Image (cartoon, grey):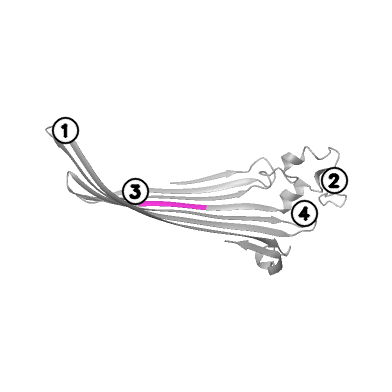
Amino acid sequence: SLSYYRNKGVFYGVNYNRFTARINADMQLAKKLKTGVRINFNYGDSNSGQMGDLYFSNPIYAMFNINPWTPMYNENGEYNSAIPENSGTNPRAVAAYDTYNDKEYKAQGTMYLEWKPIPQLTIKTTDSFEGIFTNSRQYWDPRANSGVSRAFQYAINDMRLTTSNTITYADEFAKAHNVRVTLGQEAMTDKYEYIVAYGDVEANIPYLSTSTQANNNASY
């Protein structure tokens, strides 16, 4: 199955897009052998702006500070930044020029193989994968931030592999007694990577690759 969801949000520059794909399948390979697979994939792309911060560029916070008669634009048609009651910040300019983007990829997959050599005995192995990959980028444009051009970016990669193996014996005696015995083993490995970097960048190419060593900071 495939699905797509889009939400434009109620503030300028705020939106969310999501794409989801799912696959479920079971197959009888032989009389006593079957297999199955479950795969889920999710991609999300969101532009959130400063909605999560109690700060001057947050339009909800700014509307309590900015005077009703303060113009949004200058006489030349550019955004007005002479707003002392809101620390010189025009939230509409921030929404138009700055970037607050998050991209997230999620993938989950499970595959099993089940064998019943006799009706009472089930041997099953299940292997699964789960991965979450996040890339977040923020950019402060000089036109909305007193001439400062700065970028911030972080990436998270989280990958997990799991294997589970069981042997189950189940039987009924004299139509009144049941016995069930299960032996199992499970192993998991998890790999987590994190990197964050920020620095002053060139406004014409607003990416960290244009930052100098003196103006760039990174951690892993």
Q: Secondary structure at mark 4?
A: loop
Q: How far across and down, in percent of the image, does residue 214 sit?
A: 71, 68
Viewer-side label of 4, 1: 1
Quarter where residue 169 is shown: top left
Indicate which disc residue 177 carries. Answer: 1
- Decide if residue 210 is on the left or right side of residue 19: right
Q: Nearer the viewer, residue 187 or 154?
A: 187
Viewer-side label of 4, 3: 4
Three-letter code, disc 1? His
Three-letter code, disc 4? Asn
Q: Nearer the viewer, residue 148 or 11?
A: 148
Q: Secondary structure at mark 1?
A: strand
Quarter where residue 152 is shown: bottom right
Stretch in magenta: 105-110
Regarding residue 138, the answer to whether it shows in the image is yes
Quarter of the image with the C terminus is bottom right
Residue tagged by mark 4? 145
Regarding residue 163, the answer to whether it shows in the image is no
Residue tagged by mark 3? 25
Rendered residue at 77%/54% (across/down): 145
Three-letter code, disc 3? Ala
Which badge, 4 or 3, comes first in the chain's sequence? 3
Q: How far across and down, in percent of the image, does residue 114 sit?
A: 26, 50
Residue tagged by mark 2? 84
Label 1 to label 3, Cα distance in Å?
35 Å
